[in-house]
Image (cartoon, grey):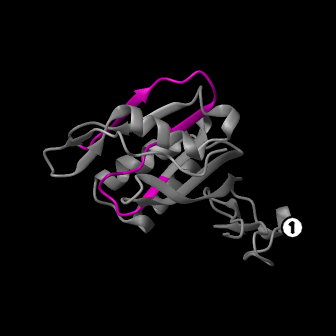
Amino acid sequence: MKNLVSLSFILLIVSCTGQEIPDKEYQIETAVLAAPEHQREGSTVLGFNSDGELMTLREGTNEFVCIADDPGKDGFSVAAYHKSLEPFMTRGRELKAQGLDFKQVFDKREEEVKAGTLEMPDRATLYVTTGDPNEETGEIDNLYTRYVIYIPYATEESTGMPLSPPAPGAPWIMDPGTHRAHIMINPPKK
């Protein structure tokens, strides 16, 4: 697997907000870096149009959704998740767009999941890949992926998972007892 992605021939679009938006092909090429390698080709890819709005860049044929790097944020971060998480993810984006902060989004989705108005799968995966854009070489260096396994309302007692990593790279449970309970796996960085 390649550890670097070439940026040398990227066409950039400057949106009306002044952000540089990478072209569609680049957004697809880098967004799928978060997905398991055998799922990349068939993943749905969400990315950004010239106005900086999130949109579907490619319809997929498998169960993964990938999200391109947000040009409005510092650094490089892409994500991939099982399509069963799409209602949860979409709702989070909607609430953030309304100006809600992290806790308000968390509380609102918790309320909606409990009320049955927001669908949350009983288990699903999320992969987040970060890296360092290298302006000198035109590549993304130091790719790193962390893993999240959503298991709503799970607890330390119901899973045997500790509430913090007992060793570097060991799994642990975060947000136990909530709609957003998940197993975190942060492999040691090289």
Q: Residue at x 52, y 59 (%)?
A: 141
Q: Residue at x 56, y 48 (%)?
A: 113
Q: Residue at x 60, y 51 (%)?
A: 3
**26 relative to 105, above or below:** above
| In front of the other: 23 or 104 | 23
Please, which residue is most extreme toward the front here? 137
Queried whether the magenta region covers residue 126, the answer comes back as: no
Q: Secondary structure at mark 1?
A: loop
**181 relative to 39, above or below:** below
Q: Residue at x 37, y 60 (%)?
A: 136
Please indicate, yes or no, whether residue 96 appears anywhere in the rendered image.
yes
Q: Position of residue 22 (x, y in %)?
A: 32, 42
Quadrant placement of the N terminus: top right
The magenta segment: 52-77
**In the image, is 97 to the left or to the right of 93?**
left
Q: Position of residue 41 (x, y in %)?
A: 59, 28
Identify which amino acid the numbered label 1 is placed on.
Gly
Queried whether the magenta region covers residue 76, the answer comes back as: yes
Circle 1 residue: 160
Please indicate, yes or no, whether residue 115 appears anywhere in the rendered image.
no
**In the image, is 100 to the left or to the right of 29?**
left
Q: Position of residue 42 (x, y in %)?
A: 59, 25
Quadrant placement of the C terminus: bottom right
Number of other residues with Cα within 10 Å of mark 1, as a class: few under 14, some 14 to 19, many 20 or more: few
| In front of the other: 17 or 37 | 37
